[in-house]
Image: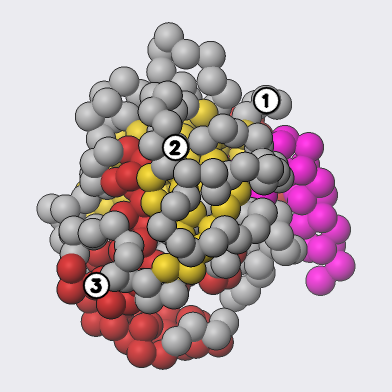
Amino acid sequence: MAFGLAGEVDDGDDHGDATAGLPETERFSSAHVVAATRTTTAATATAIHRPDLRQDLEDTSESYFRRPSGDATLLPVHFAWEQLTDSVHRCRLPFCDVTIGVVQGRTGTLLVDTGTTLAEAAAIDHDVRQIAGGPVTHVVLSHKHFDHVLGSSLFAEADIYCAPEVVEYLSSATDQIRDDALHYGADAAEIDRAIAALRPPQRATYHACYQAVVDLGNRAATITHPGRGHTTSDLIVVVPGPDDDDSPLVVFTGDLVEESADPAIDADSDIAAWPATLDRILAIGGPDALYVPGHGKVVDAGFIRRQRDWLKSFGSGR
């Protein structure tokens, strides 16, 4: 069951009134996110451009998406997508409650993080094609942890942006990636398949950077490393509206901010530096931005200040 959905509808063929009487999503009301889901199989899913992966879509959750163009057609999607602005969407994957972000532009579509398995990634890819009307052209990996990077190989035609440490980790630490994924309950066969599919990081497809601007035609997304925190090399993605649009700024924070649990702290974390990193994120986004955490609901600046204070208190007590 996908996060943020209100209920299930009948699995029959007639879905014309599937949304009647159902409440809107709990965080941001949107006519373009339909709070209904049903269990589907690969045979009934809309065709995916990677037929060899369709068997992995058994028993995934399917929801319905209506494009903001006014077209009344409900398009089948696997996850519940929140529309944050006219061109920015996000969903929460059922496994580990991972945020996936989509930024749609006139000439390209950027994806923020890729999930844990090729099955998740194939479902994400399908949904993006429904939402944006085309494939993912750019991918940002917010940091190196398995639940954000292991689906990346499915997006073979996209340019991938990540910190240099992530490139190194994907090249040399697959045993650690596997151990971490299994520790959190991932299926071993799925993880092995995802690791086997990882492409050797190459200059042609991987952009190892701490700062970049991705031109999507009518908007640009800025990738930046605000400082150490959850890991030593977290990236955030800052998305303004187009020049003629008054949409709020959207900031994808990765796991520098978490809403559905306390911040995840491990050997890679820098507790002392983390609060100042959050201050830099707040300076970038300002008081009115929509901050999209790596796990959990979209939050505001006040939430980030409270998490910063929690980290300061946690650090002083260590």
Image: 264 above or below 13? below
Q: Is residue 84 left or right of residue 64?
A: right
Write down the region rendered in magenta: 292-318
Where is mark 3, residue-wise?
A: 53
Residue 176 in picture, x, y percent from top left: 43, 84
Residue drawn at 57 percent across, 58 percent down? 9
Mark 2 vs mark 3, foreground winner is 2
Q: Which mark is residue 96?
A: none
Where is mark 2, residue-wise?
A: 66
Name the secondary structure under disc 2: loop
Q: Is residue 246 visible?
A: yes
- 155 and 59: which is toward the camera: 59
Residue drawn at 37 percent across, 83 percent down? 191
Name the secondary structure under disc 1: loop
Marks 2/3: CA–CA distance: 25 Å
Name the quadrant of the N terminus. Answer: bottom right
Residue drawn at 42 percent across, 31 percent down? 72
Marks 1/3: CA–CA distance: 41 Å
Marks 2/1: CA–CA distance: 27 Å
Where is mark 1, residue-wise?
A: 288
